[in-house]
Image: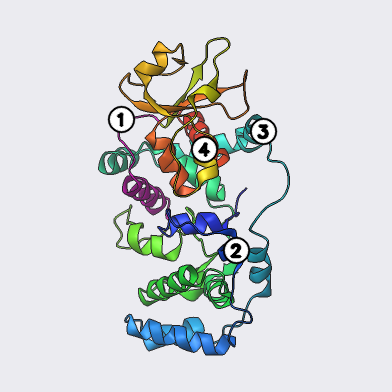
């Protein structure tokens, strides 16, 4: 789980949440691409046009060669095979006691600054630690791919040139701000640091949480949690609402009968598993009982991932914010539950 980074997630973190491409388009690439050196000259020209210094261009692009491992990993992304695990088995595997304990320890270490971050961004501290824990196990693995080489390879390959060329230019701008190349390492798909941001997300949303004048999501816990909080606020987190709560269903309740009537413009297979939206008071009238505090007027949808007779949840718009970080019900539900465990 830690260190994984799907192409779909890259699109979401880059702010392309509503890009929808056919399978044919997704597999399409330049065949063959132009020589790598020729393409790097074009990238350098674009970078100059966007104000990147010549010294940075030389340092970041001058010695690059394609990374065949990155090409192989990218090619393996579409159409993963195999039967997805049940939600219960996934949660049992990914919500271990050691992860919860590490989250609680980090929470305790940063307790003095967390009230200020919560007040500024409106996001509960427990959510920030849950994201950090899921992304990199609190910094224990952040990736060791050279980001400039990985992003240059992905852009040159051509399957998602607009996305990855833009991220490469953003990376050069980071370097122009003084971040040395040796520090710019991360996942094969360009995510880095404790929260696994892409370069464009770093430029737009990373913040200085400890007041020392830098935005160090590589090593600063304060900058890490504040940057995640800023991401959540930007994605539409609603202060005062939970991400969701466990729910008890009346005997014979048919969740399928509450299927959504809306078609999502992206990530449709994830959203298609959610019911239609109703106020919590309306769910109560149908016999659905929340098992934790949640306002009667809060809009929520019902989700029973493993089918009749298994755990069910009433999930709010804040759950959809978690999905913007990684559009996977496995991910979002495990983040929410880990957050609740950390806060115990």
Q: Earlier along the polypeptide chain: callout 1 or callout 2?
A: 2
What crowding class fits label 3: few (fewer than 14 Cα within 10 Å), some (14-19), or many (20 or more)?
few
Give the x, y percent position of residue 332: 51, 39
- Secondary structure under badge 3? loop
Q: Residue at x 48, y 81 (%)?
A: 60
First of labels 4, 1 by sequence position? 1
- Assess whether residue 224 is covered by the magenta stretch: yes
CB-based contact (under 8 Å), mark 3 and mark 1:
no
Magenta residue check for 206: no
The residue positioned farthest toward the front in the image shown: 261
Q: Under tag 4, what secondary structure?
A: loop
**Total numbered badges shown on the rendered structure:** 4
Image disc number at residue 272: 4
Residue 311 is situated, as x and y percent measured from the top left of the image, at 58, 22
How crowded is the residue under tag 1: few (<14 C-alpha within 10 Å), some, or many (20+)?
few
First to last magenta residue range: 220-242
Residue at numbered disc 1: 240
State yes or no: discs 1 and 2 in contact (Cβ < 8 Å): no
Residue at (55, 43) in percent of width and height: 269
Residue at the spot of label 3: 86
Tell me which label, 4 or 2, sits earlier in the chain. Answer: 2
What is the CA distance from the residue labelled 4 to the residue labelled 3? 17 Å
How far, Cα to Cα, is label 3 from label 1? 31 Å
The residue mark sitting in front, 2 or 3, is: 2
Q: How is the image coloured?
A: rainbow
């Amino acid at each position: 789980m830690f260190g994984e980074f799907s192409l779909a997630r890259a699109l979401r973190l880059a702010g392309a949440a509503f890009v929808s491409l056919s399978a044919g388009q997704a597999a399409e690439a330049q065949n063959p691409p132009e020589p790598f050196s020729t393409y790097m000259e074009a990238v350098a020209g674009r970078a100059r046009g966007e104000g990147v210094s010549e010294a940075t261009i030389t340092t970041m692009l001058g010695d690059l060669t394609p990374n065949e491992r990155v090409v192989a990993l990218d090619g393996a992304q579409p159409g993963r095979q195999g039967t997805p695990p049940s939600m219960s088995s996934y949660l049992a595997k990914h919500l271990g006691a050691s992860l919860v304990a590490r989250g609680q320890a980090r929470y305790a270490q940063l307790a003095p600054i967390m009230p200020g971050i919560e007040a500024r961004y409106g996001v509960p501290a427990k959510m920030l630690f849950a994201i950090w824990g899921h992304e990199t196990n609190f910094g224990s693995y952040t990736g060791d791919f050279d980001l400039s080489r990985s992003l240059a390879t992905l852009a040159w390959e051509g399957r998602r040139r607009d996305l990855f060329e833009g991220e490469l230019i953003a990376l050069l701008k980071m370097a122009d701000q003084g971040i040395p190349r040796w520090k710019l390492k991360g996942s094969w798909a360009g995510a880095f640091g404790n929260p696994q941001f892409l370069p464009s997300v770093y430029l737009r949303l990373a913040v200085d949480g400890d007041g020392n004048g830098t935005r160090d999501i590589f090593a600063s816990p304060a900058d890490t949690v504040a940057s995640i909080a800023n991401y959540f606020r930007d994605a539409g987190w609603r202060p005062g609402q939970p991400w969701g709560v466990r729910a008890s269903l009346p005997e014979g309740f048919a969740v399928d009968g509450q299927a959504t009537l809306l078609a999502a413009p992206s990530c449709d297979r994830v959203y298609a598993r959610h019911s239609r939206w109703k106020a919590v008071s309306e769910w109560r009238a149908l016999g659905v009982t929340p098992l934790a505090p949640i306002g009667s007027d809060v809009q929520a949808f019902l989700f029973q991932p493993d089918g009749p007779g298994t755990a069910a949840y009433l999930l709010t718009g804040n759950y959809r914010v978690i999905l913007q970080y990684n559009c996977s019900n496995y991910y979002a539900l495990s983040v929410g539950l880990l957050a609740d465990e950390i806060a115990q």
